Image: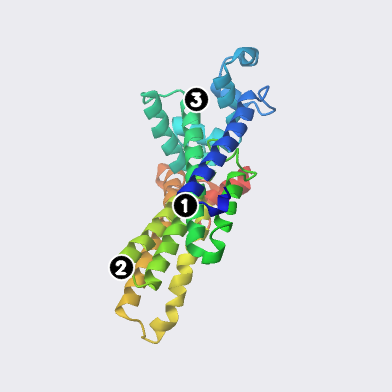
Amino acid sequence: MNAFNLGAKGRHAQLVAIFCLWKLLLLSLAAFCPGSGYDTSGLILLDTSARRHVKLDVTSRYERFILNMLRWDALYFVKAAERGHVHEQAWAFSGAYSHLLRLTGQLMAGDAQAPLHYYALAGIMISNICHLLSVLVLYRLLTLVLEPQRRQIIPFIAAVLHILTPASLFMSAPYAEAMFSLLNFAGMLFYAQSQTAAETGMSSIRADFQKLGSGACFAAATLMRSNGLLSGLILLYDVVMYIAPVMSAQLSIQDVRRMLVTCMAGSLIALAFLGPQYLAYTEFCDRSSGTGTRPWCDKTFPSIYSWVQSHYW
């Protein structure tokens, strides 16, 4: 049977099947990849003994899998899940995502002091679940916004390409990318649904909640990665479109309500971006402590994100 002639449930089933087969291949490669790799940071974190390299030859397949998935940014996310943001450069990595890893890892271990590998496993599970959900949300989004004659092919192909993305292994590791993808697509879906509801004359209350849902998803995505702030441009565009009617006093009561709802949705994104910045400022720029402050604290716009990127990387 042609995949493009199936109903929505059939295409969802096919996408899930393709996703599972692809992830099985990728995760198997990660589990059976030999050696510790040229970057031994993960091995050092998981095994602090001096004989860690000797014991590597007798490690279980599960331990080898966790080790091979613990690379690059995953080191920061997983370590922050264990102890919080201790060092300044750790603030370049989402504290919200690390906190989620901490809660999930502790729940899995049944212990508030869970071993480090539980946080890594929690990140792997969360990333794979979020990647699958983002595939399904992307499919739903495209079936909503495309013309009827293009809905049979393009959404399915786009969703498959999202499964097979070159970043697939990053979307399986303890990285924030998979959750960012899910939240960003969900925000776009809520926004598209609100626009559809407004254009078709459906419940205005429903459209308002969908617009707020869009802002909430974009805000959560911004907590995962600061460039989620750019998603708010679509809401800013809506506000700009209201400027001319405001200046000419031609706005209706419904237009005023929609503009206020859009501003509220955008404010959620701004708060998600500024909140972590404020927390970092209170930690590193407390002049009353007498311990001195960091150089970025005296900038016109003190941003720990830009400072960490320029100073450490």
The type of residue carrying mark 2 is: Ser
Of the image marks 1 and 2, the number of the one nearer the N terminus: 1
**Mark 3 or mark 1: which is in front?**
1
Q: Residue at x 66, y 23 (%)?
A: 36
Residue topped by disc 1: 8
CA–CA distance between discs 2 and 3? 48 Å
Q: Residue at x 30, y 68 (%)?
A: 203
As drawn, 177 above or below 140: above
Residue topped by disc 3: 117
Of the image marks 3 and 1, the number of the one nearer the N terminus: 1
Q: Which numbered dot is residue 203?
A: 2
Q: Whole-percent x and y of residue 88?
A: 52, 40
The type of residue carrying mark 1 is: Ala
As drawn, 62 above or below 192: above
Quadrant occupied by the C terminus: top right
Q: Whole-percent x and y of residue 64?
A: 59, 22
